[in-house]
Image: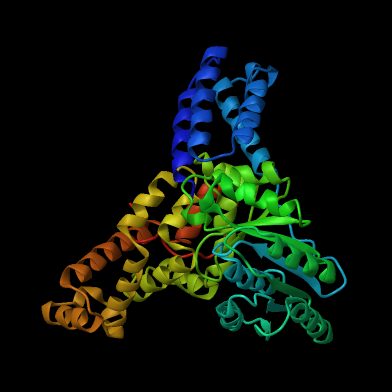
């Protein structure tokens, strides 16, 4: 996420951070580099100017000049202004209305709106404990209705049937009646998208808004479109009373222009961000955490929250007890760790959130790609329970049988065995709590505690 911007800013700020004294000249030079980094990241020009002016004013003031470490104080100024540009703090959904609370989703075609409806429904069901009904009013794309029905079944929320022969207004009125009768807490309405903003589209969604009077009207936009995302959201906001923005495909956005521009250009908060294709890949947008990640300082709070959501505590506690008794870390334990890491987005996603590790995230993903996790699982699954518990017993004939059964090569099996050995050594050094100890240590650096009972370090981590 935002790798290009993060690399440029981190490099510039490291140079300034080491200085014992700051002068007008070196502040000017640093801000010139910051300005170039933001422009290359496709941040809107007015946002760049406002940001650099605010940093210059604070950096030249008493706040920095009177600091014991002016260089470090300058970094804090940049972080604070970056956070302000992103929106200061997370803006939660306003669902404190008479049920059902209606969420109207708007956006252009191809932004990932329908998928985002399902992601948001899953989030509200699991995190907020809400009963959710979803409906599609997109009569122009029949596949959208079927797609939402399939996704609703996948995430376990109710789906209101609709048909391309119906009028959008009739569809949402029927859905509202169903939601009220069946005591649903939330109704999420997926609307039609277009390739570009047009009068017909805006007239239709405007009528839906008047009829529904939604608690939230969210604009879904592709972060990969850079500052165009902010301009499109602004155009929508001029004809529709938006309450917030959802940025999709943010995990693939190496620049960051949309995230840094949307809040300032539209005046609307970014409420959520899509961080992958899976239905669980939706996160609340926390400006302070994103600012920290952009500057290479990690995001321990998000990592800890992900761990709390995804880690199988029963398995983790069993492994901790096993290691405490001096038992060996076997291949079944190793498989459990692979599965837990997959749930948390993979090794790169985890490293990106650890202080000082963001530069290693891309390298780690290349070394241990997501598909390699599946391959390693297949190899372990092709072993007998006895072989998993005693991997040293694997001889030539056993290895040939395992690779044939998993559709892999001998070199894949040997690589797996090497990574298991590395992890086994690491676990011996960290018997009490494994990864939990490491996370607590890192958490202490950022003022956060780690979750109890996590497993070992990821494979290939050196």
Residue visible at 48% across and 40% down?
6
**Residue 249 percent location from the top left of the image:** 52, 58
Residue visible at 81% across and 64% down?
215
Q: Is residue 33 visible?
A: yes
Q: Would you place residue 52 above or below residue 391 in this image?
A: above
Image quadrant assignment for residue 313: bottom right
Residue visible at 18% across and 73% down?
409
Image quadrant assignment for residue 336: bottom left
Query: Is residue 323 found left or right of 276 in the rendered image?
Result: left
Q: Would you place residue 249 above or below residue 78 in this image?
A: below
**Residue 76 percent location from the top left of the image:** 61, 31
Q: In the image as oriented, which residue stretches furthest toward the right?
A: 98
**Viewer-nearest residue: 432 or 200:** 200
Query: Is residue 160 found left or right of 400 in the rendered image?
Result: right
Q: In the image as oriented, which residue stretches furthest toward the front?
A: 199
Q: Would you place residue 434 above or below residue 296 in this image?
A: below
Residue visible at 19% across and 82% down?
404
Image quadrant assignment for residue 424: bottom left
**Residue 412 percent location from the top left of the image:** 21, 69
């Amino acid at each position: 996420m935002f790798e290009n911007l993060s690399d440029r800013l981190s490099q510039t700020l490291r140079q300034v951070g080491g200085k014992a004294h700051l002068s007008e000249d070196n502040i000017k030079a640093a801000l010139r580099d910051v300005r170039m980094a933001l422009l290359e990241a496709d941040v809107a020009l007015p946002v760049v100017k406002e940001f650099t002016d605010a940093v210059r004013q604070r950096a030249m003031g008493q706040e920095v000049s009177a600091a014991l470490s002016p260089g470090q104080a300058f970094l804090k100024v940049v972080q604070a202004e970056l956070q302000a540009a992103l929106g200061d703090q997370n803006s939660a959904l306003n669902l404190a209305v008479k049920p059902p609370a209606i969420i109207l989703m708007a956006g252009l075609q191809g932004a990932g709106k329908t998928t985002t409806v399902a992601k948001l429904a899953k989030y509200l069901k699991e995190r907020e404990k809400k009963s959710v009904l979803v409906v599609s009013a997109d009569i122009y794309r029949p596949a959208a209705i079927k797609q939402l029905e399939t996704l609703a079944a996948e995430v376990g929320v109710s789906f209101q049937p609709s048909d391309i022969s119906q009028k959008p207004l009739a569809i949402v009125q029927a859905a509202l009646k169903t939601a009220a009768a069946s005591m649903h807490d939330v109704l999420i309405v997926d609307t039609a998208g277009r390739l570009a903003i047009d009068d017909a589209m805006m007239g239709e969604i405007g009528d839906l808004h008047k009829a529904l009077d939604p608690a939230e009207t969210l604009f879904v936009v592709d972060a990969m479109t850079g500052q165009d995302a902010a301009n499109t959201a602004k155009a929508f906001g001029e004809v529709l009373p938006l309450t917030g923005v959802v940025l999709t495909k943010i995990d693939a956005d190496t620049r960051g222009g949309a995230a840094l521009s949307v809040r300032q250009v539209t005046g609307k908060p970014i409420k959520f961000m899509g961080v992958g294709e899976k239905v669980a890949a939706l996160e609340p947008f926390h400006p302070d955490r994103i600012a920290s990640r952009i500057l290479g300082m990690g995001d321990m709070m998000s990592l800890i929250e992900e761990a709390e959501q995804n880690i199988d505590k029963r398995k983790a506690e069993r492994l901790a007890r096993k290691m405490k008794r001096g038992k060996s870390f076997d291949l079944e334990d190793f498989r459990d760790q692979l599965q837990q890491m997959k749930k948390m987005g993979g090794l790169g996603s985890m490293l990106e959130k650890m202080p000082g590790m963001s530069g290693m995230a891309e390298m780690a993903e290349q070394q241990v790609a997501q598909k390699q996790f599946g391959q390693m699982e297949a190899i372990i699954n092709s072993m007998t329970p006895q072989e998993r518990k005693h991997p040293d017993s694997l001889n030539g004939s056993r290895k040939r049988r395992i690779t044939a059964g998993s559709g892999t090569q001998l070199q894949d099996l040997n690589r797996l065995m090497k990574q298991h050995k590395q992890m086994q050594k690491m676990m011996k050094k960290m018997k009490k709590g494994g990864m939990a100890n490491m996370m607590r240590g890192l958490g202490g650096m950022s003022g956060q505690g780690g979750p109890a009972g996590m497993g070992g370090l990821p494979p290939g981590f050196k």
